[in-house]
Image (cartoon, rainbow, N blue to C red):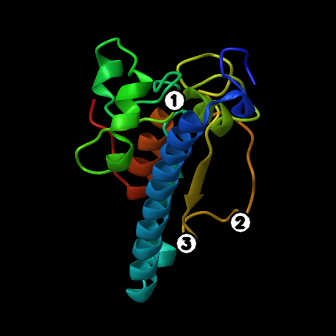
């Protein structure tokens, strides 16, 4: 843990309640995304297109510490160079994650999400540059279950897709 992030055991009860809610909302969003990917996979299987569909799954450059040391019920605070006061977040606790909020979790959750790397996606300590990329295409890729350790960049994916589709890049 970096020194700027307080230890969980040092937090006040209302902070723990708020920060737990922040991660609950994030976890619920991930569960929803996972369920929707599952629905797409089932539809591809049902229609016989599963093995002939190129599927890429990646992330957005690691966990983000933009929520600061209190998180935020409305990320526009951060976009305007502000940190959301703890009291404002607590007033919005019950609505956290609903349509009338634009929430972001505490920087401590970002640090945990980037473990074993330090810091966040905005920094250069690998927490912001070490993301998984999963590629699935049984009819187009012979390799099965291999783990590769080289770095990639999202810009590398577009030429691969165009090549797989037989589309020439117009320059």
Q: Contact, CB < 8 Å: mark 1 with mark 3?
A: no
> Which type of secondary structure does the marked residue at label 1 adopt?
loop
Q: Give x and y (percent) for residue 15.
A: 55, 34
Q: Which mark is residue 64?
A: 1
Taking the spot 51% from the left edge, 76% from the top edge, the residue there is: 51
Q: Which sits earlier in the primary sequence, circle 2 or circle 1?
A: 1
In three-dimensional space, the C-alpha distance between marks 2 and 1, rounded to whole angstroms, equals 32 Å
Residue pictured at 45% horizontal, 81% vertical: 42
The residue depicted at 63 percent of the width and 16 percent of the height is: 124
Left-right relation of 99 to 23: left
Q: Are marks 2 and 1 in contact (CB under 8 Å)?
A: no
Residue 139 is tagged as 3
Question: Camera-side residue: 138 or 21?
Answer: 21
Q: Pick whichever, 142 or 168, lies toward us.
A: 142
Nearer mark to the viewer, of 3 and 2: 2
Q: Secondary structure at mark 2?
A: loop
- Can you tell which of label 2 and label 1 is closer to the viewer? 1
Q: Position of residue 171 (x, y in %)?
A: 28, 29
Identify residue for label 2: 144
């Amino acid at each position: 843990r970096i020194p700027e992030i307080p230890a969980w055991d040092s937090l006040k009860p209302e902070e723990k309640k708020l920060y737990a809610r922040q991660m609950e909302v994030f976890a619920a969003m991930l569960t929803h995304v996972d369920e929707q990917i599952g629905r797409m996979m089932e539809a591809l299987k049902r229609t016989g297109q599963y093995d002939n569909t190129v599927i890429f799954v990646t992330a957005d450059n690691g966990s983000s510490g933009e929520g600061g040391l209190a998180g935020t019920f409305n990320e526009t605070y951060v976009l305007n160079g502000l940190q959301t006061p703890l009291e404002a977040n607590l007033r919005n606790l019950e609505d956290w994650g609903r349509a009338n909020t634009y929430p972001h979790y505490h920087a401590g959750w970002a640090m945990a999400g980037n473990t074993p790397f330090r810091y966040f996606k905005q920094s250069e300590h690998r927490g912001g540059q070490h993301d998984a990329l999963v590629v699935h295409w049984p009819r187009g890729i012979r390799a099965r279950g291999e783990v590769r350790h080289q770095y990639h960049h999202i810009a590398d994916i577009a030429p691969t897709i165009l090549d797989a589709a037989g589309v020439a890049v117009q320059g």
